[in-house]
Amino acid sequence: MFIHNKRLQYTVRVAQPNPGLANLLLEQFGGPQGELAAAMRYFTQAVGEDDPGRKDLLLDIATEELSHLEIIGSIIAMLNKGAKGDLAEATQSQADLYRAINGAGNDSHVTQVLFGGGPALVNSAGVPWTAAYVDTIGEPTADFRSNIAAEARAKIVYERLINVTDDPGIQEALGFLMTREVAHQKSFEKALYSIQPNFPSGKMPPIPEYADLYFKMSQGAEPELGPWNQGKGLELVLDPQPAVDGGSGGATVELPKDQIATLKALARRTMSDPDIDPVTGAELGQTPQKE
Amino acid sequence: MFIHNKRLQYTVRVAQPNPGLANLLLEQFGGPQGELAAAMRYFTQAVGEDDPGRKDLLLDIATEELSHLEIIGSIIAMLNKGAKGDLAEATQSQADLYRAINGAGNDSHVTQVLFGGGPALVNSAGVPWTAAYVDTIGEPTADFRSNIAAEARAKIVYERLINVTDDPGIQEALGFLMTREVAHQKSFEKALYSIQPNFPSGKMPPIPEYADLYFKMSQGAEPELGPWNQGKGLELVLDPQPAVDGGSGGATVELPKDQIATLKALARRTMSDPDIDPVTGAELGQTPQKE
Amino acid sequence: MFIHNKRLQYTVRVAQPNPGLANLLLEQFGGPQGELAAAMRYFTQAVGEDDPGRKDLLLDIATEELSHLEIIGSIIAMLNKGAKGDLAEATQSQADLYRAINGAGNDSHVTQVLFGGGPALVNSAGVPWTAAYVDTIGEPTADFRSNIAAEARAKIVYERLINVTDDPGIQEALGFLMTREVAHQKSFEKALYSIQPNFPSGKMPPIPEYADLYFKMSQGAEPELGPWNQGKGLELVLDPQPAVDGGSGGATVELPKDQIATLKALARRTMSDPDIDPVTGAELGQTPQKE
Amino acid sequence: MFIHNKRLQYTVRVAQPNPGLANLLLEQFGGPQGELAAAMRYFTQAVGEDDPGRKDLLLDIATEELSHLEIIGSIIAMLNKGAKGDLAEATQSQADLYRAINGAGNDSHVTQVLFGGGPALVNSAGVPWTAAYVDTIGEPTADFRSNIAAEARAKIVYERLINVTDDPGIQEALGFLMTREVAHQKSFEKALYSIQPNFPSGKMPPIPEYADLYFKMSQGAEPELGPWNQGKGLELVLDPQPAVDGGSGGATVELPKDQIATLKALARRTMSDPDIDPVTGAELGQTPQKE
Amino acid sequence: MFIHNKRLQYTVRVAQPNPGLANLLLEQFGGPQGELAAAMRYFTQAVGEDDPGRKDLLLDIATEELSHLEIIGSIIAMLNKGAKGDLAEATQSQADLYRAINGAGNDSHVTQVLFGGGPALVNSAGVPWTAAYVDTIGEPTADFRSNIAAEARAKIVYERLINVTDDPGIQEALGFLMTREVAHQKSFEKALYSIQPNFPSGKMPPIPEYADLYFKMSQGAEPELGPWNQGKGLELVLDPQPAVDGGSGGATVELPKDQIATLKALARRTMSDPDIDPVTGAELGQTPQKE
Amino acid sequence: MFIHNKRLQYTVRVAQPNPGLANLLLEQFGGPQGELAAAMRYFTQAVGEDDPGRKDLLLDIATEELSHLEIIGSIIAMLNKGAKGDLAEATQSQADLYRAINGAGNDSHVTQVLFGGGPALVNSAGVPWTAAYVDTIGEPTADFRSNIAAEARAKIVYERLINVTDDPGIQEALGFLMTREVAHQKSFEKALYSIQPNFPSGKMPPIPEYADLYFKMSQGAEPELGPWNQGKGLELVLDPQPAVDGGSGGATVELPKDQIATLKALARRTMSDPDIDPVTGAELGQTPQKE
């Protein structure tokens, strides 16, 4: 069960309204690297998790991310507060109001103000939050890796946002939020390492003959050499070929006779070359064969 | 520039048609952990990348993932081939056709067959692929972590799919695809480690006083102790409080006088308690103050 | 700031696993009338709200809805727990496993199990949750009406779900959740009535000559008479006509001369009848006139 | 069956082209509170409705909303007409054209003009219309409440749009559209009241012991008292506790023995604390018990 | 302005309820090739169209498609009518009700019934309709080609649906709808041909040296020869090479000095090979040159 | 299998950075008429195609479109390169940086830069690419028509983009891409004509009595006459009526007795006029009859 405390986890002090900046900050309210995405990623993992330790960890951080969602939302609400009132009360001539809200070359925030000025669950381009951002799959060694990556991405987006505002109160609050991503990343890394072995994820072993190959699929220049394509555990294949299994490289299915007949009937009507067997790509009458 | 070779990277041999299984395999064609998502994740990183080594790596793997997309799509096409023809030619009574296509309790594939039987860019529930699955942010230490996680997730989904089919040709091909995810994960890990330091991502340092704290936000039981909440680099805060900055925990903005007046006018019309300052939450006349 | 208590608001006791039912219950986890939609509707309103009383109300109910999200998610996790393990451990032959998970004619849950068995933020058809479900617009008399409607819809969906399960533990928990929607609806109605006047929403008065008309746009039978189209406050217009303003019913814009010339050039190239003025729909040379 | 009359329901007279304003007006063409959403909300209810009176009402208003969609779309087309021709004919140097279209700090409309200048079914931020906006659930007392709320929201958005334009022709047309929302809201309210009783929606009664409680989930300050949390029909619970049912607040499922064994096998591989029963969260060997 | 006639354009006679079939028919109510998509494609083109003849054509067909939407929706409502009542009234034991609604192996329709039984604006897999299906771009020779294709696709989907039902009343109504797609396709083709020339679309001529080439990008087998890659108007290039313009095939931008310095600083921190110029991919100090 | 060549198909030479223009060009990277949509349209058709000639054609063009995706993405990366570095390195005061990136009245690109500066799979308004753009249905005469239309649309969007930039290197590259759309359109037209007959698509003949009618659904003015509504193959119906089949124009279903009783029970609770049969819309007791 959740309980809410009316005081924010970090105090929000905004120097002056700025709907354009509010709009940018939506990236961390309703954007893909934002706080709702983080909270929901960890919350869905927690609910499906059986291990008490991991469940505890996931609920701790999910709850903190909800508290961060409240902080970033409160900053946005403060930045939009004046414009929201101006629009509702129509304080000025319409042309002035349009200009005032439209500000200095930043229009998505007009949409936001039009939408009520409170924080909407959209990113900075106005795209609604979608659960497609949440990449939980219910396997802890994969999910912890997803969480580590998510925290690293969120850290970068906060850094970029801090770089475009000089409001010290906002900088402080964003700095706090950015810092917490770093702390969470540490926790998730330690949780991943506490499961041994954790690579590869899951139970099924890779097929040995393909597990160490690095296929040089991008050609046309000297290959860049690096630890990622040669050396320990990886073997560089400079000229990768199709059908690594030694087969034909084709795709076949063994169909019942009546379905073959049906496909031939279909071919007669629509095929550009009706002498070819539509089932196998071979000439009519030729049987598909196991390579 | 891309060039295509008509032969698949791995030969596809399907034992018999099975639209229900085709439908499940869509998860790796047009689903969030599928091959298009992988190809597009690495391709967008490659196009924006300046470093020749990393760009090379990303193009190699993006190209291989496109080749995997072709393999998984070809399996789906083989599994649907019979049903597609049956529906187009109306080979049976309508009731039989409905039953034949509807098969053994699996209906999304009816949608797929209705849609033409070829592989559609949807997941196994029929949801269209969206670029919201692609989490590229253009910072290599974050993006490589995202790639590592993506490969781990894809490995698991292939493992689950292998567990629900006994067609040896499909098992082999899926096993190949699963194995390549493991190989790619290794490459991305080595690429990440080749950047030093790689933690935290980006340039801005975390704020020291908050960087090591673990807030025990989920209460009501003895805390589970683990490396993720105590020990080296992390300090466990058992009873986390609001306003860690020592302030009020409120949210304030300093508004120009005319906007304050506008908000009061708005309040008079809609507020349930019009004696409260809508700007600060304080009683009317009280000035918001820096804590 | 949010705090979590490990104990659920209502105890979850599931009699036996049932992935098909789990799939249906997703409707209230990640569906449009579900608990995340409710929590986010009230939370976004709360963050943008200035009035202390309304903010308090919205935070109370948003927090309870998050607690409900946890309950419904926990039921789903319990219902999927067995299938999740079976798939991860491949306990049976693949064909048996496919059948066992696929169950009695219900395939979206196969997707769910494939996805890890934990509750995903999707509806019962597998569609990811989207913030497009959240209809907050930042005006309290409109938003409270939205909230009242949302609670009524959620009540109905819970009722339908209770009607398709005979597991007493699930019935009890769903009954609790359904009941709470009724209680919340009462609170929102009282909150709406506490703002006087609350109709029409906003500040701008309707135009008197059009405010009471009911246009009988659907014809071809005797009109059904009811309080909604005649009687107090509404006047029935049986044969509604275009251009109620008395004008031409056309659409015009006054363009600068150079843009008119440009449009004529465009017309010469693509118009099927190039003697007509593309700007006004009138014959070339005719000036658009104010009606 | 629908029939169209070429004359608009309200004459559109636009004083001069303005792609930036066109872009804002898209909010009511393809946005969540716009005319397509309204038309489709009532149309889908009408098609599923059995009661002749309600069906009549819903078809009347759905048809009028389609007519409003045509009005708002025509205004947008007029506002974009010049820019569309300029872009197609390349009347100016490219740099001038870019500036001319890009106008005064408003860029989403560049996208719109790029897209052809006609009204696209997107909101003012360019997000495509989605049926996720339509909240029909096929129960009249819930659906009428949804309709009442939808009309109230649309009224507010029109009011905001009127506040940012000084074109009298557009103000008049938007005023008409805004007024009609008020009239429709009245009709839906009267239709709701004509069903008695209409609260709570549906057939199943709420559970009495939870139906009147107001849980004070947001803490940390004196509670704001209001009719929404105390007084007639509601009882204020100041310190809400988990497990209101008197149980453990846990989540349990009774699994068959073989699935318990499977989960233990899974736990041995991935659990951080393998001595805990993954099924119940209790120590291994401990049986889950009914509270 | 639209007017509605209560009688359908084609009478709907359904032999018996069948929620599974209702679910499939949703493909043409809220699916990509369905009637709403058709109506909205032509309606948006009509609103943006200046030519009276084309506008007339587009409004005629848009209005008919809305009338078709009503027909297909009414069929769906009839097919679901029994199940909707059963669920609302809970006529049977819950287990029986679950089975009765869940029917013969078709689960998305459970979602639909859960959703109220009326036609929802989703496709047969439950995916909400999106304006992303509408491909209007505001240029008539392109839009008419889009319309021709859309009618052809819709014809095929109706054909497939007719093939899976033996209800004569539904077959008749679907046959009418299918036939009308054919008639509309004819009208759009004639309208396209009435614009001369109509190829290529738009005003800007193609670059002659690239306009007739067919690049054989898919290799590894004898090329299939056909009118599409050789003969009149097309020249087959068997071994296509990069950089057809004769340049380097690279990508360069001329940056101001300070931005080059910034990128070098960034490189020093994150590049795996910091001796390479991140701007040009060349060794540091080497100037990017015009080829 | 795909192979990549590091050299682009067309050399990219950008004169100077311009994030605003980069943002517009996203329309052809991740927009509905863009190169990913094209590549995926042809690729999914190819994978499901049985005819060797058509499969060859589709793979050739799909592969070239992927190569175009790389070109347009590389232009975008070049245009954003400076701003990306400036933001990562925080080279200026925050206010300057905000202004510099925000540029001349174009804000969606701020989102793009915030997102890392590389090309994201979104359109120029920031909307993520969705497979809903791909209209493949697996029937060649319909799909080729879709492809012809798609190429025509893409040609127009390139033309518009060329009209808003004066950078000669970008104009050249976009001119190449535009030209290739024209060439592809020719190939698809020839491929369509090589299938005879190709109209109507599919196998089922239209119903003769409805196949040639043109219903004049939009009234209120003299009808515009054209080849699309009269003359060869089309018969103009000036005053179209409902129920063209000669029936009642109603919708009926024959329900089992128990379901009729259930619906009456439901009616008693919610109907506004309970004397009407909810099943047929007729007065209670009246039997629905075949017309």
Image (cartoon, coloured by chain):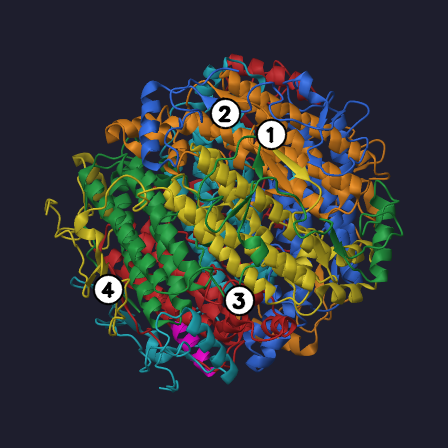
Chain colours: A green, B yellow, C red, D cyan, E blue, F orange
Assess whether residue B198 is covered by the magenta stretch.
Answer: no
Q: Which residue is mark 2?
A: E251
Name the quadrant of the N terminus of chain C.
bottom left
Q: Give the CA separation, mark 3 to mark 1.
A: 45 Å
Tell me: C215 left or right of D109: right
Q: Label 2 amino acid? A: Ala
Q: What span is colored magenta in the figure?
A: C168-179
Using the image, name the chain to which the residue with label 2 belongs: E
Residue C65 picture location, percent across and down = 35, 64
Helix, strand or loop under label 3: helix
Q: How many other residues sit within 10 Å of disc 4, few (<14), some (14-19) or many (≥20)? A: many
Residue type at mark 4 is Lys
Residue A72 image position (x, y, % from top left): 28, 48
The residue indicated by pointer 4 is B216
On what subunit does the disc labeled 3 rest?
C
**Same chain assignment for discs 4 and 1:** no
- Crowd around label 1: few <14 · some 14–19 · many ≥20 (10 Å): many
Task: For marks 1 and 2, give the CA distance.
Answer: 33 Å
Look at discs 4 and 1 and give the one toward the viewer. Answer: 4
Q: Magenta stretch containing residue C171, yes or no?
A: yes
Which secondary structure class fits the magenta region best?
helix
Image height of D266 relative to F130, above or below? below
Which amino acid, mark 3?
Val
Residue type pointed to by label 1: Gly
Q: Quadrant of residue A43?
A: bottom left
